[in-house]
Amino acid sequence: MPDAETPPPRPRPFVEADYPALAALQRRVFPEAPLSEAALRYEDARLQEPYRRGRWVMGQQGALVGWGGFYQHPSWYHPDRYALELGVAPEAQRQGIGGALYGAIIGALQAHGARAGEVLELRTSVRGRYPQQLAFFTRRGFAERQRSWLLTLELARFTPAPWEPLLAELGQQGYAFASVEELERDETQLYALYTFYQELVADVPRTQPFTPWSFEQFLAHRRSAPNLLPEGSFVALYRGTFAAVSELKRGATPEQLQTGLTAVRRAYRGQKLALACKVMALRYARACGAAVVTTRNAASNAAMLKVNRALGFTVEDADIELARTLDPGRADGSGEA
């Protein structure tokens, strides 16, 4: 513990040289959902104008022990809406580091201000297994908006054999399956794939309106995101029309993969297409030697939870989305403790 009369170091702006240490720190703070350095760099590089972002770090004895920041995501962009990130190394908690980082975030957002007559909307998420995180943000005026379940499947427990009759039945009904990699190689399919994804993502349960991407944003993401695994992501097609998809993404290690978007167009629901696409993706994950697949399931989406449980996923934790408003014209005294 530091001397009680010695104040903790002040937050400093994050710099490019901090990426390796930040990735290592995030793996320690959130080992169940680590991000690679490449993924961190990619996500930051996406946030060019008009998206605003800022990040600060704190260190002890030459090592990073905390980080915090804000950003605006392309999928729900609004000039007055921000997401917050915050984490402190286990051995450095309860020393005022989280409060100092939060204070830096709030100070910067107050300086940015909002449009005339508007307030800022702040969002963050915490894991259920870390009640101190929930208490930290609750004390600062945040309240729960949505809860999602974080699920894990040990692939040693999964076999595609019981699902082969379903795949065969869907084939007899006129459905075909193709990897996203196959579809992306066909340039005549790219715009149809873009509109397909935009429609599905807009239907995902969320607490803020979806902001559609441009076709150029979509292509840039598909061609450069380091965690995408198009060869392990599968689309169900009916007479050439995209009907459903289940994406597989890379984790921070080759042994851990994660499910991305799994969704079905409204006209094709009720035919177990999400289940079938996910079986295809899990079959690929098992064949390529992965040990674990994780996924996220909105608590309100009972149909998808039923699919995940049928495949053997088990609930490991909750991801709790929190929100509050901030009036830039008024002092906010919640960031100094």
Image (spheres, rainbow, N blue to C red):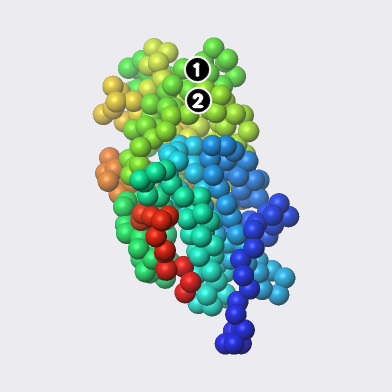
Residue in front for this viewpoint, 315 or 187:
187
- Can you see residue 254? no
Q: Do tag 1 and tag 2 residues touch (Cβ < 8 Å)?
A: no
Residue in front for this viewpoint, 255 or 87:
87
Answer with left or right where residue 281 lies relative to residue 243.
right
**Location of residue 144 (image quadrant):** bottom left
Residue in front for this viewpoint, 77 or 80:
80
Q: Amino acid at mark 1?
A: Tyr
Q: For mark 1, does the 10 Å Cα neighbourhood hold few (<14), some (14 to 19), or many (20 or more) residues?
A: some
Assign a secondary structure to mark 2: loop
The nearer-to-camera label among 1 and 2 is 2
Q: Which residue is mark 2?
A: 214
Assign a secondary structure to mark 1: helix
User: Which quadrant: the N terminus?
Assistant: bottom right
Q: Which residue is mark 1?
A: 191
- Can you see residue 66? yes
Above or below 59: residue 266: above
Q: Residue at x 39, y 12 (%)?
A: 239
Where residue 39 appears, x then y in whole percent? 61, 45
Q: Amino acid at mark 2?
A: Ser
